[in-house]
Amino acid sequence: MEINQLGYIGLGRMGANMVMNLLDKDFDVVAYDQNQNCGHQLGEERKEEVETEKLQLPSSLEEVASALDSPKVIWMMVPAGKAVDGVITSLLPELSPKDILIDGGNSYFKDSMRRAHELKEKGINYLDIGTSGGLKGARNGACLTIGGEREVYEQLEQLFKAISAPQGYLYTGPSGTGHFVKMMHNFIEYGIEKCIGEGVELVKEGGDKFWGEELNLGKICGVWNKGSIIESKLMGYLADAFNENEFGSNLEHLSGKVGGGETGEWALATTLELNIPASCNALALLDRYRSRQDDSFAGKCIAGMRNVFGGHKIEYKKREE
């Protein structure tokens, strides 16, 4: 079906950037966040679309649904767990058979399977979408892994193609597979971040021990990201982190504490359920817990990377007056 309008719930870091991506691709968006400041900030940034009503910012979930044409398409980008169930419960009285709900957040895949089953009994279609690419991806072209009924996916393929990176969307299979694949994507990310952080820490300590001076870690990560075998987005993000003045030239102002870990916990439980060894990624998850107990340089690297690509919260060390 031709789609040029959708509802969007959740205007945090990822959600606001996704809505701007949608507006740039000429979709009409009815957007809402329970934090009214988020909607206000988005409206200030996209005043022209607000004036022409291409972007509507109602004050309730119910108003989002009532502003949409049928069949309604509503994309949720809210924290996993109770928040998703709460939004669905609030929207259900406003929905009709053949309407489509999308969960684009990091939900647990078994929850997505349950929700799809429950909604199908009411005639409501449900897609679970793993959304990757950080803030830049959300704004300019995300990577999407999409689970649900193929027929529903095909109805919205025009939408997915428009807001993803070139060849950056994939129908992964039945309900739950989109979030399952994204969960494992995050688990892999943990391992790569740990490896980069530990390697760069070795470079730092080697400079101190063998030459008695600091090597330029930002430039080293930068040149590694220009054609080397370990070139990657994450290496580029770490190079950018070293260039953030607020972090310090060698990240000395950052705490080594690394946040996150929920999807990694689900992934680790799944590896045990499947009896598949995943020692590298499991250790990377446990290392995040360790980072909250002391102040490692590798932790600083990971925290800096995550802040650059995803705007994830970081902690600064207390500076002496």
Image: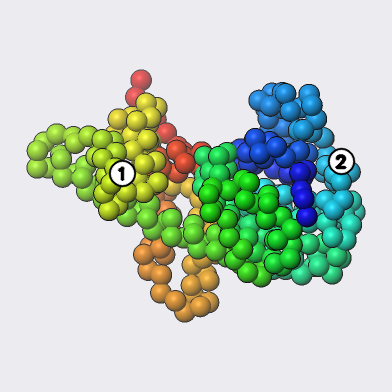
Q: Which residue is mark 1?
A: 225
> In the image, is residue 34 above or below residue 92?
above
Label drawn at residue 67 = 2
Is 199 displayed left or right of 49 in the figure? left
Residue drawn where x is 70% and y is 61% of the image: 154
For label 2, the SS is: loop
Is 98 displayed left or right of 233 in the figure? right
Task: Look at label 2 and name its amino acid.
Answer: Ala
Which quarter of the picture shows residue 124? bottom right
Which quarter of the picture shows residue 278? bottom left
Instruction: Pick whichever of labels 2 and 1 is earlier in the sequence.
Output: 2
Q: Quadrant of the N terminus?
A: bottom right
Residue 3 in sight here: yes
Label drawn at residue 112 = none
For label 1, the SS is: loop
Residue 298 in sight here: no
Task: Return the residue nearer the eye: 3 or 241.
Answer: 3
Task: Look at label 1 and name its amino acid.
Answer: Asn
Task: Return the residue nearer the eye: 44 or 272.
Answer: 44
Q: Position of residue 41 (x, y in %)?
A: 67, 27
Q: Position of residue 255 (x, y in %)?
A: 39, 39
Residue drawn where x is 19% and y is 36% of the image: 215
User: Circle 2: is it few (<14), some (14-19), or many (20+) Cα within 10 Å?
Assistant: some
> In the image, is residue 145 above or below residue 295?
below
> In the image, is residue 114 above or below residue 101?
below
> In the image, is residue 119 above or below residue 38?
below
User: Circle 1: is it few (<14), some (14-19), or many (20+) Cα within 10 Å?
Assistant: many
Q: Position of residue 317 (x, y in %)?
A: 39, 33
Residue drawn where x is 76% and y is 48% of the image: 3
Mark pair 2, 1: CA separation? 46 Å
Task: Return the residue nearer the eye: 65 or 72.
Answer: 72
Is 185 displayed left or right of 149 in the figure? left
